[in-house]
Image (tube, grey):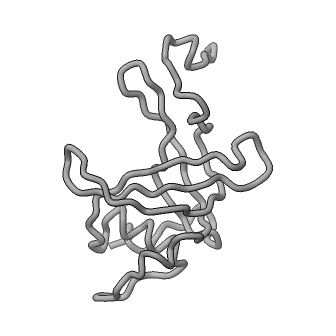
Amino acid sequence: MAKFSPEDLGLVKPADTIIAPGKNVAELEAIEPVTTSRGDALKYRFRIEGDNEFTGKTITGLVPASVKIGSKNCEWVEALMGKQLEPGERIDWQTLTGSRAKIQVAHRQDGRMLFSNVIAVYSINTPDSIESACSNQ
């Protein structure tokens, strides 16, 4: 089967925003509260590390603002903290900035625009095959 680029498929990609799908090591630059059509969310912004064509580029991922056990936000916080959250534990959001993690990148299409998004975050020290404790409950 032939492979086609986004341009071949008639998709428009925003300049400097397309990062290949897969895992990358990245540093968390910021977490920003946002409101989406689905409610309150947090936008995590990462800068890609390493020695490849994506080094230094930024990429974002959105998660619902809830930090309940089993939530995507809980998984991402645990990965960035490098530990499982204890029930009732308070999160110092500012200390997460600068944390390193493995991020899973995927592409999303919105009309004719193609975007790269973070869809999962894993601890920098955890093998790819081990999931966050949040996802096991």
Q: Is residue 127 found left or right of 69 in the rendered image?
A: right
Quarter of the rendering containing residue 127: bottom right
Quadrant that contains the C terminus? bottom left
Q: Is residue 4 left or right of residue 118?
A: right
Quarter-wise, where is residue 99 in the image?
bottom right
Residue 135 location (% of width, % of height)? 38, 67
**79, 32: nearer the viewer:** 32
Residue drawn at point x = 57 percent, y = 11 percent: 8
What is the x, y in percent for residue 87? 30, 87
Q: In the image shown, does 95 or 110 lie closer to the viewer?
A: 95
Q: Is residue 6 above or below residue 137?
A: above
Q: Residue at x 55, y 63 (%)?
A: 28
Q: In the shown orientation, is residue 41 left or right of residue 55?
A: left
Q: Residue furthest right?
A: 51
Residue 118 x/y as whole percent = 49, 49
Q: Residue at x 58, y 34 (%)?
A: 18
Pick the residue in front: 99 or 74: 99
Q: Is residue 30 above or below residue 62?
A: below
Which quadrant of the rendered structure holds the N terminus? Answer: top right
> Which quarter of the picture shows residue 123?
bottom right
Tell whether 3 sits left or right of 13: right
Residue at (51%, 38%) from the top-left corner? 116
